[in-house]
Amino acid sequence: MFLLPDFDLHACERPRIEHIAPAALATTPKTIVAVVNPRSAGGPHDFSSEGDYWWPDPKNPDGPYIQRDGLSNPDNFVAHRQLLIGFARDFSTLAAAYRVTREERYATAGARHLRAWFVDPATRMNPSLLYSQAIKGRSTGRSIGVIDTLHLVEVALGVEALRGAKAFSTADDTAVTAWFRDYLHWLRTHPYGVDESKAENNHGTCWALQAAAFAHVTGDAAGLADCRRRFKEILLPRQMAADGSFPRELARTKPYGYSIFNLDVMTALAQLLSTPEENLLTWTLPDGRSIAKGIAYLAPFLADKTKWPGKRDVMYWDDWPVRQPALIFGALATGNTDWLATWRKLNPDPSVEEIQRNFPIRQPVLWMR
């Protein structure tokens, strides 16, 4: 499946991982119970967030919020999202460090985070998402809030990387895996999860990547098979245009960033679901559309943003691109050295919060099988 025999991803990434690992080692686990959203309808163990693009109505300041697409309201509650992203960043770093070095200190620190988030009754997060992307005066939670746990996909793969470590006991593994199994059941059965699975834009892609990653960590073969079917029959054919672009993302007020984000997530999904018998990155619909075609469409604009033919994003235009995982997964699957070269020159560890939020795949070594 990997067509760059002279390129060793672990060797390439190890210096970077070891450089950022000390900060992750020094981090004390902190879960959502540390911060309470006074406007949430949920309890202290329920993840809470508020819709980014919703603002007070100037004509009715005390009434329901109104939407301003693409413009984030800085006064909305995002502390739980920040905590989850910070956890995912630190834990994935520790898991990647353990994978490339096999040093137990990384597994010890990683297991500590896992127990705090998924096991300890005092600090764990409930395996549901009832109060995410709430809107003042309109909703206590929404189906599109499912996207807020996208960063757990790399956590799930990191759990797999820690299996076998002395610090990650069988009891820990059983408890953490049970959490992911419960959350996956919620995603598949609750109306919020069901509705999100039907979305025909990046939200549907993000639901599928979560379902696939959580099925992978729990050993759910039937769930993985369903995700492969969704990829082939729903996601790729309904979202990608003939030229490899994503029209629904191009129609947004941040077309560049949304195009990058959806391509990254869909490519990661193909990477995760590929088998030795079938490479979904190069798998092609009868009309020629494929993940490889999507990467080919966007790659020139990742290499040189000035060539982007569409509108500039209304926010964060200057902060994209970063080291997009679509480039490395695509390069390894096709042997495209231009994509590899672009990936290697981009920033692997962005510091801008909004970019971090839309950059859920930070440690590609965790995705290699």
Image (cartoon, helix red, strand yellow):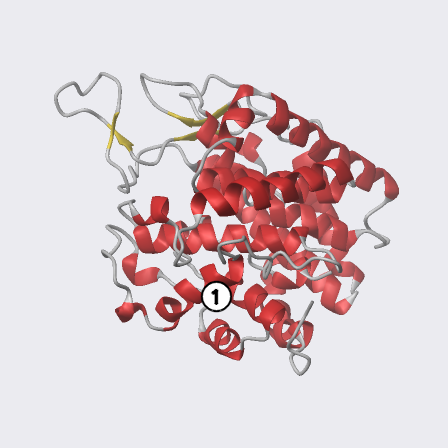
State left or right for residue 200 relative to residue 116. Answer: left
Find disc 1 in the rendering and name its residue: 323
State left or right for residue 26 relative to residue 216. Answer: left
Where does residue 139 sit, x and y in percent of width and height? 38, 18
Numbered disc 1: secondary structure: loop
Which residue does the image show at 73% across and 68% down from the upper left?
Answer: 100
Q: Is residue 196 visible?
A: yes
252 lies above or below 343:
above
Where does residue 268 sit, x and y in percent of width and height? 58, 54
Mark 1 residue type: Arg
Q: How many marks?
A: 1
State left or right for residue 234 relative to residue 2. Answer: left
Question: Which is more toward the observer, 212 or 32?
Answer: 212
Where does residue 328 sit, x and y in percent of width and height? 56, 67
Question: Which is more toward the observer, 197 or 156?
Answer: 197
State left or right for residue 351 relative to residue 316. Answer: right
287 lies above or below 113:
below
Using the rendered view, name the quadrant where residue 13 is placed: bottom right
Which residue does the image show at 48% across and 66% down from the upper left?
Answer: 323
Q: Residues within 10 Å of mark 1 (few under 14, many from 20)?
A: many
